[in-house]
Image: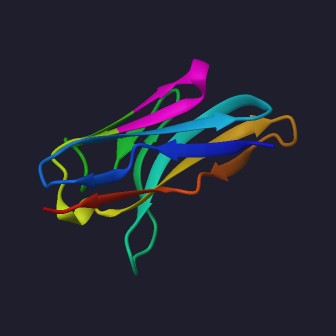
Amino acid sequence: QVQLVESGGGLVQPGGSLRLSCAASGSIFKIYTMAWYRQAPEEQRELVGLISDRIIDYADSVKGRFTISRDNAKNTVYLQMNSLKAEDTARYYCNMYMRTIQDDGMDYWGKGTLVTVSS
């Protein structure tokens, strides 16, 4: 059974930085796409950043401030968040599309980590 576990969230002041990590474990053959989403209270979940073998993309609201990266050997994706703003406050979810021992391609989600930007 595949599990995704996020870490690195917390409380930070405006202008500060945080680094999120998400590690996948289980019977994984290949991870095609890794991504971070976020959901603020009473808002829809939105894509923050996505990384595959050929593509890196970001939401316009985070371009120039956030950087997504991955370590394939560790099945881990990172999100470096700089110049944080109050509007970045949300629960951040890790998403991976992968091939496992049970299926050829499926989306998996972590339970999320809370990021609060406040003075």
Residue 4 left/right relative to 21: right
Residue found at the very far bottom of the displayed protein: 42
Q: Is residue 55 left or right of residue 117?
A: right
Left or right for 82, reference 24:
left
Measuring from the top left, give residue 16's x and y in whole percent: 16, 46
Q: Nearer the viewer, residue 59 or 4?
A: 4
Point 25% across, 50% down: residue:
62
Instruction: Using the rendered image of the protein, determine whether residue 12 is visible from the camera's viewpoint.
Output: yes
For the point 81% across and 43% down, which residue is it?
Answer: 1
Quarter of the image where one finds residue 91: bottom left
Q: Position of residue 68 (x, y in %)?
A: 38, 36
Instruction: Kindly give the residue lying farthest to the top in the view shown.
Output: 73
Horizontal arrangement in the rendering, residue 27 relative to residue 17 (left or right): right
The residues colored magenta run: 69-79
Residue at (34, 52) in percent of width and height: 10
Colour scheme shown:
rainbow
